[in-house]
Amino acid sequence: MSGREGAGGPLHLFLLPSAGGSRTLFAQWPDALRERLGDRVVTHAVELPGRGSRIAERPPTQLSAYVDELAEQTPPPGTSWAVVGHSFGALLGAEWAARASARGSAPRLLVASAAAPPWVYSTAAALQAPLDELWTRVGELGGLPAQLADSPAARRLFGRALTADFTAAAEYRPGRPMRTGCPVLAVQGENDPLVRPALTRRWQECTDQGFTQRVLPGGHFYARGVDDLIPTVAEALLPLAAAPLPAPHA
């Protein structure tokens, strides 16, 4: 697919998990979005190295290495696509969008969920700790699945990805906002102890294409998890999925 051949096709939505998380975080999204948007949106829950089906792979400790891999998945110019990233995933999504935009393949939308803009503040640096304590802190935020909470062996297995992600996020401190080349929707939980409204608002600095800020009930993982984002994301995607791609700039 090249040029504008993808203008009439579906919008491809890439989903990026929080630190240590796998694609199962978004298990309910394909069916839920299909109910709301039909076949106009195709979801791609990304599996990062060191977890899920890629548990045997060593996860990188530099955010740029994750984005190098994501960049290989960038749809070609003329394809409609968008990114949702939660927490650590929002950092990946923003850097990916900026790289893609610089190459003429900007997404239609970036959703930055429960994340502080990395040029302003690093929540990962504030949370870094030895692995057992790190899992405790993740659990207090609501991000520890029951199967991990009940299994020390599973926490050790997934701990490599968690610590790698935290290291990558803590050391990722760009000196200025990345330019995403697309509208940004920044979402936070009203009781999130890590990300307050003033921080969320700073995401507007990385775009001149439009910015929206939304607050949902709950904390860092909202009231019931990232599935609480689905209605908000579906609402934002509806006009994009129904409209053709904008004409390229001359």
Image (tube, rainbow, N blue to C red):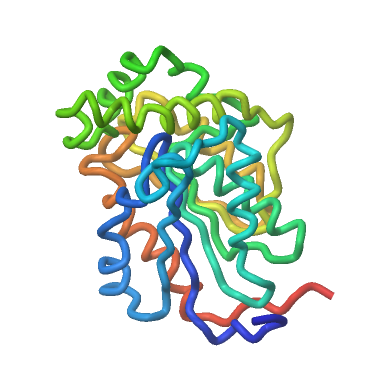
Q: Quadrant of residue 63?
A: top right
Eyeballing the image, is 10 above or below 32? below
**For the image shown, how many numbered marks are present on the structure?**
0
Q: Is residue 118 left or right of residue 216?
A: right
Q: Is residue 131 left or right of residue 60?
A: left
Pick the front one: 169 or 160? 160
Image position of 37 (left or right of 163):
left
Q: In the image as oriented, which residue stretches furthest toward the front?
A: 56
Residue 101, picture quadrant = bottom right
Position of residue 229 measured from the top left corner of the image (x, y, whole percent) = 33, 52
Q: Position of residue 122 (x, y in %)?
A: 54, 24
Frontmost residue, 72 versus 42: 72
| 158 with respect to 13 (left or right) | left
Q: Residue at x 37, y 65 (%)?
A: 234
User: The C terminus lies in which quarter of the figure?
Assistant: bottom right
The residue drawn where x is 64% and y is 82% is 1
Residue drawn at x 52%, y 83% as measured from the top left: 9
User: Which is more toward the observer, 27 or 237?
Assistant: 27
47 or 81, which lies in front?
47
Position in image of residue 70 (x %, y %) = 58, 53
Residue 32 in the image: x percent, y percent?
Answer: 26, 66
Q: Residue 187: tell me if it is visible.
A: no
User: What residue is rendered at 25% in x and 31% in y?
Assistant: 154
Residue 199 visible somewhere in the drawing: yes
